[in-house]
Amino acid sequence: MRGTMTAVFCAPLARRPALTAAILTALCASSSPAFAQQAGAAAPALAAAEFTQLESVIVTGTHARDRTELNSTAPVDILSAEDLRAAAGAEANLGQALQALLPSFGYLDQSNSGSADHVRAGQLRGLSPDQMLVLINGRRVHPTSIVNVESVIGLGSVAVDFASIPVNAIKRVEVLRDGAGAQYGSDALAGVVNIILDDAHSGGELQLNTGLFHTHFAPTERTLNDGQTVNVQGKYGLSLGDGGFVRAGVDATHHNPTNRSGFDQFNPNYPAQNLITFQTGDARIKNLNLWLNASEPLAEGASLYGQALFNRRTSSGGAFFRESNDPNNIASVYPNGFLPRSTGTNEDWHLSGGARGQLTPAWAYDAALTYGRNTFQYGLENSLNSSLGPTSPTAFNLGAFRFSQTSANLDFTGDLGNLGLLAASTLAFGTELRRESYASTAGDPASYTTGTYGSTLVPPVSFAGGAQGDAGLQPADVADVSRTVGGAYADLSGNLLSSVFVDAAVRLDHFSDAGSSSTGKLSGRWEFAPRWALRGALSNNFRAPALAQIWSAYAPTAYGNGGGLSTINILPVSDPRAQALGAQPLKPEKSHNVSLGLTAQPVERLQLSADLFRINIDDRIILSQQIYAPAAVYQFFTNAVDTSTKGAELVGNWSTPLLGGNLHVSDASAWLSNTIRGVHAAPPALLAYGGALVGPQSQSTVTNAVPKRRDVVTVGWSGNGAAGSWNFLGRLTHTGEVTRVFDFGPVQTYGSTVQLDLEAEVRATRDLSLALGLDNLTDRYPTQSDSAINYGGNLPYDFLSPIGMNGRYVYLRLRYEIK
């Protein structure tokens, strides 16, 4: 079996440089100027308007509840609004819902991780967060303006902020687990998350979610009640009377912080007192989302449409506690030490509008303009710049970041009838023009200045410059840059035979700063027996480096040489200091994807799918290891490694009538392995500093920091009882082990975990329902960290485990439907 899988994975990859050329040749041979990716005759259940809205995401037939579409040429997970509502977790967050429902999706809490405490990143198929493309109604969503430079998961990535997309705005989510560069261009190496907004023409709902963590915390032998959360949602739709509609909503959350720190063994008062000085856990979050989705018909079948989403979030997270005897503490300011708190103010806009209609009965068009903007103001409280002495400020503005993206799209879709061997074929082609801009501004001078206070003391004392926690952005490191991107795609799909459906696509993209890339994809599905089919795909994809990766500079505080805290200077590759260490201009990552799957409906009410995949990425962008130059510690981004990700995904669904209601059982499992095929040679300039470009810690974040296995088993029953209609949900999640590696030596493996979630919902009246739920019912925690990395007992658990480190969460949901 292993030899067969290797042959399946490796044989197509051996010919990978010619993939795009082969698809172009196939296009020319068929005398077609372009290939469309819509499912054509294989998808009669999709209305034309919905088809255009989804653009090039392939969806065929009726979607099984939170499961993969069986008729597609690649695996697609379909998640309904009901699925998301029951899985959105403590913060009513889309990313939390996706992680709970999909074993291939990761969305971990971060703590003591600077900006990563404020903007969390999602992963698909164990790859980097920015190797997954996110769409809203088929239109590209902009990423955040900040780089995660202090996180473990998604280290160095520029991710889409899932917390800025409210769950109550969503009609469904479709997750395409396959490379899709030929349809969308950059970023779709791991797959695509397409968020379809609620478009109901009438009615609405009000919803209240509230809960808290109630847990026994073994490291301190205490029962904790924290993380209190209140989430209020509302939405309503109005019909415009002629087929148009306006639907709008609000989603507001207040989430208190959690603290899972142990007793501080570094504190001078220890062990006389059991002191908890750190704050390790969730940040304090206030999150506001506003949204609108609308459409208005015009003459002759045309229509105008538009969407608007706005997010404003303020948050506060803990940094590392500075003890009273810390060499950079000033006792007259903080006689008992101090806990710096990072603060973030995040503001996000997504605006999209356009027109769609029919050119002819067989040909449709869709023209759209989309604008996205993210700003992030980074700050620090309860800190000081010790080099300025007792008069140092205790709160700092560390700098601000801004990213904006404007996209213009024009797409055409048509039915070609019979084109050679392709029966009822569909052709789509289109263009995209995109403008991206990135800018940063400096922090307060006190946040980065090195003062002279230490030199005035007797004897003189050397104090570190800059704010304790993270230093501010200096004027010399600010950026204001932009680039243009142009792309064109073509896609043709149809049935070669009644049992064979094929799809082929090509795309050309040009970046004003990163050059040109061509991508192609061939995929197909063969129903070799009634309700049994093989599917597979070959593609090449790319990801251009983010502007923030190319141009941003940071000075975070992190583990340094020997495990102590150090200021790490993360430099743009254009910085002379980085170039002196051998930094080179960043170039696009390039991947080659191959997948093979089996789908089946062997008996009524049972659906199965199994897919194997392999994704080889060349010139993957990661942060270099820490480089200890004489004056400071440096890191920079580099195309340092070639990686390989291979895995298998299994999905099963079964439903049956039971006890006057309906029972639904599903299992979704994912196995994956990330390996580094090669590390690029270090530049000669690094030889004086150890000669290594990428250390064990950076390599570990790519390979074994992601679990090799996840299983999500869900059992649900819905029906009527004497007290009203009831829904019961049970979800069991198994997550495999992960390993964390540090450059200064320690290695720790965190064992596999099992989490049980339960929910019961009763519809007391026709319009009112009440749900009670428990996430992590059995109050499971990950493996405790050993003494080499628990930082003197302060950090007993690592957030690397997908089960998190907060324990049991108890919640109540009240929902009122407005007819």
Image (spheres, rainbow, N blue to C red):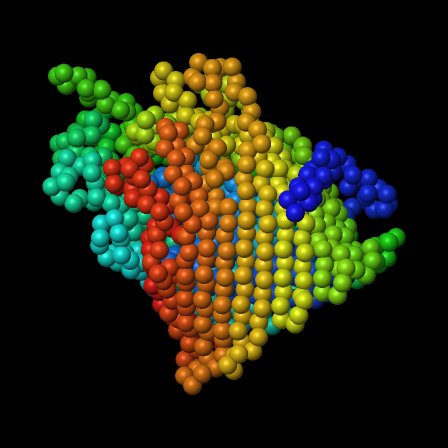
Observer able to see residue 478:
no
Which of 131 and 679 lies nearest the eye of the viewer?
Answer: 679
Which of 174 and 778 lies nearest the eye of the viewer?
Answer: 778
As drawn, 635 above or below 82? above
As drawn, 265 above or below 532? above
Which of 268 and 669 lies nearest the eye of the viewer?
Answer: 669
- Give the residue drawn at x 58%, y 65%: 653
| Residue 81 percent across, percent down from the top left | 51, 64
Left or right side of 607 for 96: left
| Residue 767 percent across, percent down from the top left | 45, 78
As drawn, 476 above or below 199? above
As drawn, 596 above or below 389? below
- Give the residue drawn at x 50%, y 38%: 703
Left or right side of 463 for 347: right
Observer able to see residue 327:
yes
Residue extending farthest to the bottom is: 722
* Quarter occupied by residue 499: bottom right
How many numbered marks have been drawn onto this rendered protein structure?
0
- Give the residue drawn at x 50%, y 61%: 713
* Quarter occupied by residue 620: top right
| Residue 550 percent across, percent down from the top left | 51, 30
- Give the residue drawn at x 66%, y 70%: 603
| Residue 312 percent across, percent down from the top left | 40, 50
* Quarter occupied by residue 436: top right
